[in-house]
Image: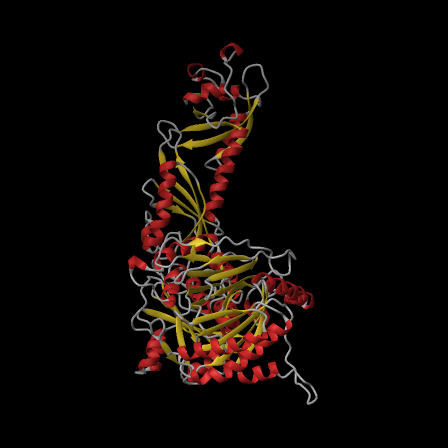
Amino acid sequence: MSGSERTPGPDPGRPEDTAVLVVDQDGTIRGCTADAAELIGVRAEALRGTASDGLFAEQGVWEELRERATEASCISLPAGLLRGSGEPLAVRLDLLPVEAAPPPAFLVRIMPVAVADRRDEDEALLRAMFTQSGMGIAIHDADLRMTRTNPVPGQALSQAEGGPPGQSLRSLLVPEDGARIEGRLRRVAETGEALTDFVSSARLAESPHRERSVSVSALPLRGRDGTLHGVAVTFTDVTEQERSRRRSALVAAAASRLGQSLDVRRNAEVLTDLLVPEFADLAAVDLTETVLVGKEPGDLLAGAPLLRVAVAAGDGRWPTELYPLDSVVRVQETESELLRAGSARFARDVSELGARIGDDESRRRLLLAPGATSFMVVPLHARGRVLGAVGLWRTEGRAPFDDEAAVLAEDIGSRAGLAIDNARRYTRERRMAEALQRSLLPQPVLAVTAADTAGFYVPGRTAAGTGGSWFDVITLSSTQVAFVVGTVVGHGLNAAAAMGRLQTAVRTLADLDPAPDELLTHLDDLVVRLADQQLPEAEDGSVRGATCLYAVYDPVGGRCSMASAGHPAPLLAPEGGGPAGTVKLPPGAALGLGGAPFDLVELDIAPGDVLAFLAGSLAQDAARDAVAERLGSGAAPGGQPPLPVQDLGQALLAPFLGTPPDDDAALLVARVRVPAGGAVAAWEFPADMERVGDARAETARQLTRWGLDELVFTTELIVSELVTNAMRYAGGPVLLRLIKDRRLICEVSDTSQTQLHLRRARLTDEGGRGLFLVAQLTHRWGSRYTASGKTIWTEQLIDHPEE
């Protein structure tokens, strides 16, 4: 063959560059495939009848092939294929004898070495894949029936031993597992997108209770024309890895979720939510009653009551055959010893447990759930004490509890025990803080001459929300009353104690009857001194930064004066209903921070007007606006008689209590009033000692009109002494005022700000016995400064105040 007959061949690296020649016994070419001309570079017509040796650079290629053909049915030989004037192309010759008549012929396959090596690699790879047993391989046809698998004994997706080819996953696996995997393979076949590391349960149909998980990867198999031939699948048994992952995830979830709440019940509910359905199908938490109230748990003896505080079922329905939520369960001797032992116990077969229990109905309701196949009980311990127990059940379709499950349950149970005990201790602290807080607050409903009041304290949802807000109602001299409200920095017991110190200080200062701004000035100085003495670790509950609003209402004059140290102003609703507004009161600086003077505000208040003092979270803008809106309409709803202050306060709090806030709140509601008509009498006298007798006479006549003849003599003595002292030492004018209330009040006012002092006179003293006599004749007495001087007041008990 001349070089002019050869044509340039295609790229020899392509897999389709393969030529097949039909050769007779002497090496003459009788025919070829269509690809031969492309690879060899000679037309097919020119090849027929030529000697095959002429195609190769080496001599005797055909003879060597013939000699080897006697040794094997298929042999291979390297050679150099002549292609024009260029360098010979390295090829591999494969001789395949053909049984045919007339005389036998041979097929000679010519492949470039690169193509041959690649085909050898592909064949070696397939052989290795379908003969190895480390990783499962399966070929599925277009209908997703398995046509070929490698021998992997026991693998979840391998063909059942001795089973016929063409099985589907639905027949090999539990139906739901087979359908899940088959659905993903069908998506691969339809979209052509590869599937990588899809982890799924793959329980064999012949052993459905045995847990199995596989990691599946899949590729579509398509021909050169794009026709789908099937799906190639590789799978690995990852049961242990998946089981370990779920265990780790469950423990991690327990570590992160348990203990987030400081409520005992909430922690128990979180525990059941963690365990169902991931670990069990049913779960119940039973706790000792002492734990629920925050007390220290005692020894769990036989007969001790446990309260079922949380339950969870995989299907959402708790079996009626078991004790329901909030039922009381009493442990027997066996359960008591088991829980004190501290380790989890389980029964693989519930039927055996039922046989041991027999007809004991209480224990059957405690231990036997319908449909359950396995049971476990996990004690809840903390700091060496038994808090309760967790009951767990597994039903058919899930592997029974084993030692590994018990270890995991104990790990989670220990975390739950600490979380529940921390919540218990916080519950105890919260109850103590609430008890201390409520003991320091005045009685909820108080009726005095000046006002009807009702106070409300709302603790926060947690112990951290207790102890900061407070209110007080202080009766002052001459039927006056003080309304106090405030908030202490911090929460809990420290805040409640700080509130108690602040309340005591306010009450002590209020006994001197100072004006509100003056009282806050003294209180601010006291707070600074208390804060300087406070230990650094007691910051939660510091009096520094506390807020306080102090208001004094005088029912005789119908005037209310108030000042604020950093606290929001009160709300004022008019008598008979109408929009409630906020008193225009500058808030001032909080106690112990500013040192600036406090502003005094005075306003006239009509009888029946309602003041609402807010503290804590109730004083925040949104809650405050809601209270103001309800206060305006609730003071006298629809023209009806005014609501009692107790009912009014509850109506104001109703929407607020729907979702209790994290922080506490306080509300003080006061409906002011004035003394009954004719209950006040007043006279003014000049500084004339002769007018002392007139003062006694006016006093006697007024007491007679009031029907208080039994007090005439003592009151005349009191008036005589006080008026005489006022005229002698202060000059005039002197104001005398009598007020008939629950007690008889006598006031003598002058222009001097010199206070009187009670002392015991000696036998040789000519004076000094007047105030001592006043003190003996009265129930209480005292003095207060006024804008124009001072007032000395006394109180005497009345036998029949209702008259």
Front residue of 574/777: it is 777
638 w.r.t. 95: above or below: below
Q: Is residue 56 visible?
A: yes
List the single residue furthest toward the front.
690
Give residue 543's position: percent from left, percent from top: 61, 65
Q: Quadrant of residue 525?
A: bottom right
The quadrant the C terminus occupies is bottom left
Q: Residue furthest top?
A: 4
Please give the count of numbered marks on the rendered protein.
0
Residue at x-position 37% and y-position 48%? 181
List x then y, in percent, for residue 357: 34, 81
Residue 383 appearing in the image? no
Residue 318 lies in what quarter of the image? bottom left
Residue at 62% of width from left, 65% of height from top? Answer: 523
Say which quarter of the image contains residue 29. Answer: top left
Q: Is residue 430 left or right of residue 728?
A: left
